[in-house]
Amino acid sequence: MENKNTHIRYYVLFDNHTQGMKLHELLDNHEIPNRIAPTPRAADGKAACGMALLIHPDDIDAAKACMEENHAEYVNIVPLENQLQKKRDRYC
């Protein structure tokens, strides 16, 4: 049986788009992999902004350390089972 935790992804949630873009740039500058993603419906109500940063479990500790060291603004970090759907929003 496959470990369910291998499908966990971390979504960093924000109050506004500016906070998200600043953190995205900060993590990129520190070469910490991250991806801009829509806030998952499963995290609904935990952030006012529709933007999130998606971070792989292998990179979350480095991301948290970078965020703390640089006093990055964010609302919450939510671990969720992977919410990405490869065939979503494809029309061809």
Image: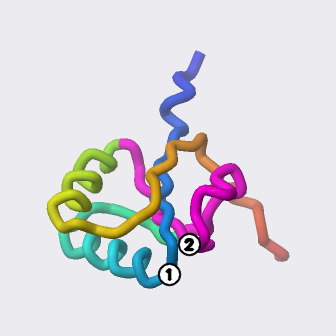
Residue 39: say if magenta: yes
State the residue position of label 1.
17
Q: Residue furthest top?
A: 1
Which x, y percent locates residue 69?
Answer: 15, 60
What's the residue at 39%, 43% (across, down)?
Answer: 57
* Quarter residue 84 falls in: bottom right
Q: Residues within 10 Å of mark 1 (few under 14, many from 20)?
A: some
Picture layout, residue 71 above or below residue 91? above
Residue 92 location, x and y as percent? 83, 76
Task: State the extent of the magenta-drawn residues as a range.
Answer: 37-57
Would residue 35 be found to the left or right of residue 85 on screen? left
Q: Earlier in the sequence, mark 1 or mark 2?
A: 1
Residue at 50 percent across and 62 percent down: it is 13
Residue 79 is a magenta residue = no
Can you identify the residue that label 2 sits on? 51
Residue 76 is left or right of residue 47, and the answer is left
